[in-house]
Amino acid sequence: MFTCNVNGSVCVLLVVMGPDVEKLEQSEDFRSQPSLFSSAGSSRCDPQNQAGVKTLVAVTEEVEEFPRVLHLQERYPDLVAPCLGLHPLQAAGGQHSVRPQIGLDFTPWCAPTQQDRDDQMKVFIGQLDIAMEMDLPVNVHSRSAAKVTIDTMRRRGISRALLHNFSGKPAAALEAVEAGFFFSFPPAVCRNQQRDRLIQRIPLDHICLETDSPALGLHKNERNEPANIALSCSYIAKVKGQTPETVRDVTTQNAYRLFSRASR
């Protein structure tokens, strides 16, 4: 999550990819580097920065990234808040590979067999139970598995969850709203109107904004940047018939309710 000063504060979720995190560690000051965080400088550190990022929830992609993200938090305690998780996919030999965030991905190329789906479910439930034990929110990746993901979280007693880049059916989304879950949408929603109906149906007080940098930007072949959070804000405002200022303020409060431990 970023909170960005774009005529105020808006919130955005960020997925940190492994190579980018490694580059950050090697740089003397990541705020000045032409990297994933090139627009992530806080206004407290860079008055000329238009994004004005206050808080970054850095989401891991692989287990090897855990120490790197924790290192970033130690180095920039006023900016970086870690969000550690795995999306495991069992290989035939019993070894785990991972994808961003915890969750379920039942697309044919990620889960071609029922055993693959069962293996994902086992690890997903394990991570949900850890979140419950530690009283932490969960940031959830769900693809071709919206209903089963939501049903599983409800059965495990999860009350604080963000379904990032959600593309499931409105009926499933409304079940998640009833459970108190949140949804976030990246700048990629601006490309077409496929998710307009979904955004219209979800109450604004259950929506957050995200970039999912460096992917899911306005254009498929262009690197997404944190400053593009303003695009998500403006688009959702248009779809819902609200002002960008209203969307900015409400989604900011939503994100802080969900990620209550994030630095403010």
Image (cartoon, rainbow, N blue to C red):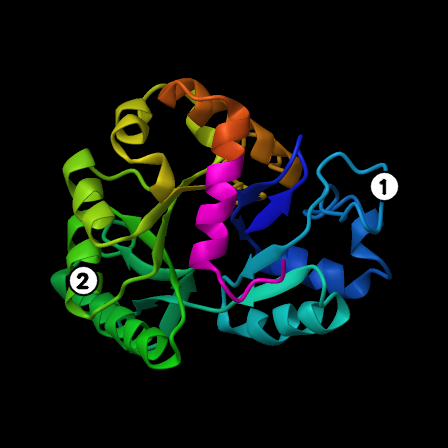
The label number, if any, that marks residue 139 in the structure image: none
Q: Helix, strand, or loop for circle 1?
A: loop
Assess disc 1: are there few (<14), some (14-19) or many (≥20) residues with their C-alpha within 10 Å of its C-alpha. Answer: few
4 lies left or right of 156: right
Q: Of helix, strand and loop, which mostly describes the magenta segment? A: helix
From the top left corner, tell me how far across and down residue 77 is, in percent: 71, 68
- Which residue matches tag 2? 154
From the top left corner, tell me how far across and down residue 42 is, in percent: 76, 49
Q: Helix, strand, or loop for circle 2?
A: helix
- Up/down of 20 relative to 171, above or below: below
- The picture quadrant where one finds residue 134 is bottom left
**Region rendered in magenta:** 249-264
Nearest the eye: 178 or 236: 178
252 lies left or right of 29: left
Residue 101 part of the magenta-drawn span: no
| Label whose residue precedes the other's in the sequence (1 or 2) | 1
Q: Which quadrant does the C terminus fall into?
A: bottom right
Residue 237 seen in the figure? yes
At 43% from the left and 57% from the top, the residue drawn is: 258
At 21% from the left and 56% from the top, the residue drawn is: 149
From the top left corner, tell me how far across and down residue 76 is, in percent: 75, 65
**Furthest residue in direction bottom, as rendered:** 133
- Which residue matches tag 1? 47
Whole-Å distance between the Cαs marked 1 and 2?
Answer: 44 Å
Residue 260 part of the magenta-drawn span: yes
- Up/down of 129 relative to 188, above or below: below
- The picture quadrant where one finds residue 88 is bottom left
239 lies left or right of 56: left
